[in-house]
């Protein structure tokens, strides 16, 4: 049976960004398929009565230091976005559009790097379209698509499906039915892929 990793994420999550930088290599090294599952983290929080760790000030301060350590460990660039916490509704709807349009890899790169490398305010419509234009993505097509009820409903369904599967935050990865939460659990994802 082919191996795969289902990756549930939101661009507004810095730890989702870190997981995104590592999962393609992990999957390639194990001959596994990486299945992207963009979801709305705010919807997950609401459904599970969860909240972002940064609302607890000591935990938020520690988390920023921890993320910075991990970014250095992975050898990837990371800058805490000054606009955090970002409303990601439009860009997560955009992820559904990109998935349907066959350009999700490019869109993921554009959005994650805009937020966590280039400090862009991706809650602003003009900024979203500027980033898309800079990356050669069709902002006009995305803008039209994300207003369509069918696409809005699709993001809701994916988010509800994530919650039904046990997701309570991002990033969350599944190897088969085995769930791993947090970018600091990527070693466990690798171990799960090692099991025949």
Image (cartoon, rainbow, N blue to C red):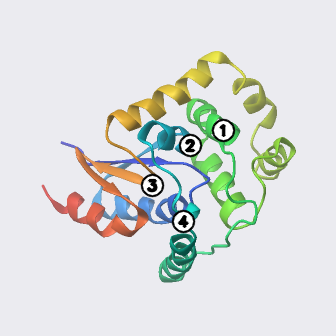
Can the viewer see residue 14? Answer: no
Q: Could you tell me which residue is drawn at 58 percent across and 42 percent down? A: 104
Query: Which comes before the other along the chain, label 4 or label 3?
Result: 4
Query: Which comes before the other along the chain, label 4 or label 2?
Result: 2
Residue 12 locus on image (x, y percent): 62, 53
Residue 18 locus on image (x, y percent): 51, 66
Q: Could you tell me which residue is drawn at 55 percent across and 48 percent down? A: 10
What number is the disc on residue 70?
none
What number is the disc on residue 171?
3
Sort mark 4 into few (<14), some (14-19) or many (20+) by Cα contacts within 10 Å.
few
Query: Which comes before the other along the chain, label 1 or label 4?
Result: 4
Report, in whole angstroms, how far the alpha carbon at label 2 lies from the one at label 3: 13 Å
Q: Nearer the viewer, residue 167 or 151?
A: 167
Question: Can you tell which of label 4 and label 2 is closer to the viewer?
Answer: 4
Report, in whole angstroms, how far the alpha carbon at label 4 lies from the one at label 3: 19 Å
Q: Residue furthest top?
A: 149
Q: Which residue is mark 4?
A: 56
Sort mark 2 into few (<14), some (14-19) or many (20+) by Cα contacts within 10 Å.
some
Q: Could you tell me which residue is drawn at 12 percent across and 55 percent down? A: 196
What number is the disc on residue 42?
2
Report, in whole angstroms, how far the alpha carbon at label 2 lies from the one at label 1: 8 Å
Q: Are marks 2 and 1 in contact (CB under 8 Å)?
A: yes
- In the rendered view of the protein, which quadrant contains the N terminus? top left
Q: Which residue is mark 1?
A: 89
Sort mark 3 into few (<14), some (14-19) or many (20+) by Cα contacts within 10 Å.
many
Q: Which element type, helix, strand or loop, lies under badge 2?
A: helix
């Amino acid at each position: 049976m082919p191996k795969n990793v289902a990756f549930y994420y939101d661009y507004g999550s810095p730890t989702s960004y870190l997981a995104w930088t590592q999962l393609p290599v992990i999957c390639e090294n194990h001959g596994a398929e990486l299945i992207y599952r963009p979801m709305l983290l705010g919807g997950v929080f609401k459904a599970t009565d969860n909240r972002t760790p940064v609302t607890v000030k000591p935990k938020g301060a520690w988390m920023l230091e921890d993320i910075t350590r991990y970014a250095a460990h992975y050898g990837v660039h990371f800058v805490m976005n000054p606009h955090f916490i970002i409303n990601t509704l439009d860009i997560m709807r955009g992820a559904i559009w990109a998935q349907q349009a066959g350009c999700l890899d490019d869109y993921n790169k554009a959005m994650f790097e805009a937020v966590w490398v280039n400090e862009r305010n991706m809650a602003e419509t003009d900024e979203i379209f500027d980033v898309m234009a800079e990356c050669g993505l069709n902002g006009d097509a995305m803008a039209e698509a994300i207003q369509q009820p069918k696409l809005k409903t699709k993001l809701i369904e994916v988010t509800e499906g994530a919650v039904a599967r046990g997701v309570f935050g991002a990033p969350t990865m599944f190897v088969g039915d085995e769930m791993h939460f947090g970018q600091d659990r990527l070693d466990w994802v690798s171990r799960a892929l090692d099991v025949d």
